[in-house]
């Protein structure tokens, strides 16, 4: 009788250990699934931008208007732009929200707008004849505390002879 009780106790212990291992493996799988789902959702919410340059004046050295158009469906809370090619495209510092970050890049302070679908700034193209065909912009956007940073290219106007 004692041997039978001992055997049953051992079997119960083994079954409980197996159940604990199974439960742990299910918890790990559930956590991995939640992490993958969160990463997928993060990528789905990534803002998509299109950069447009329009002449805002005439003649050499005239300012241009840089418009960042949000092409994805979700609106952003905040956007910050840095010109990665300051020798080709530079923000003018005579407008609100523009800070000098150094010799290489100029930046726009974050724009806080709940319904931001596009943002626009005056920019200069220092030497259109020497410019490449594109300028790169680093765009950092925030939505509900989440942040994305992407590089967007703006087509530069060709120099007029």
Image (tube, grey):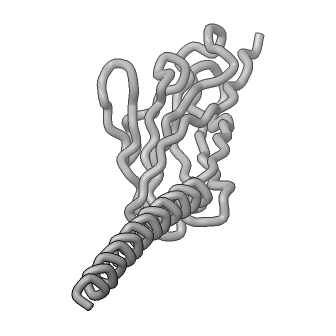
Q: Residue at x 38, y 51 (%)?
A: 110
Q: Residue furthest bottom?
A: 1
Which percent across, then down, holds residue 20? 35, 73
Q: Position of residue 144 (x, y in %)?
A: 42, 67
Q: Position of residue 106 (x, y in %)?
A: 39, 31
- Locate residue 94 relative to residue 123 in the image: left or right: left
At horizontal 49% and vertical 16% (from top left) the residue drawn is 87
Lateral position of residue 42 relative to residue 1, left or right: right
> On the rendered structure, is 63 left or right of 23?
right
On the rendered image, what quadrant is the C terminus found in?
Answer: top right
Question: Is 106 located above or below residue 41 in the figure?
Answer: above
- From the viewer's perspective, is 71 left or right of 25? right
Residue 82 or 146: which is nearer the viewer?
Answer: 146
Quadrant holding the N terminus? bottom left
x and y, in percent, of residue 64 in the image: 60, 34
The structure residue drawn at horizontal position 38% and vertical position 67%, both measured from the top left corner, is 21
Would you place residue 127 above or below residue 154 in this image?
Answer: above
Which residue is outermost to the left?
2
**Splitting the image into 4 quarters, where does residue 103 fall?**
top left
Relative to 11, say whether 1 is above or below: below
Query: Which image quadrant is residue 95 in?
Result: top left
Q: How many marks?
A: 0
- Which residue sits at x=62%, y=19%? 60
**Nearer to me, 111 or 21:** 21
């Amino acid at each position: 009788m004692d041997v039978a009780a001992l055997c049953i106790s051992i079997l119960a212990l083994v079954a409980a250990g197996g159940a604990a291992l199974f439960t742990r493996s299910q918890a790990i799988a559930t956590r991995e699934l939640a992490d993958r789902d969160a990463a997928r959702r993060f990528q789905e919410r990534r803002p998509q931008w299109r950069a447009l340059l329009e002449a805002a004046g005439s003649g050499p050295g005239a300012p241009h208007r840089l418009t960042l158009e949000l092409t994805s469906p979700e609106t952003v809370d905040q956007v910050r732009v840095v010109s990665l090619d300051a020798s080709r495209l530079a923000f003018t510092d005579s407008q609100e929200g523009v800070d000098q970050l150094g010799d290489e890049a100029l930046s726009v302070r974050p724009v806080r707008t709940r319904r931001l679908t596009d943002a626009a700034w005056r920019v200069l193209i220092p030497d259109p004849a020497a410019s490449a065909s594109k300028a790169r912009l680093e765009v950092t956007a925030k939505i509900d505390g989440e942040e994305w940073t992407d590089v967007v290219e703006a087509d530069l106007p060709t120099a007029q002879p």
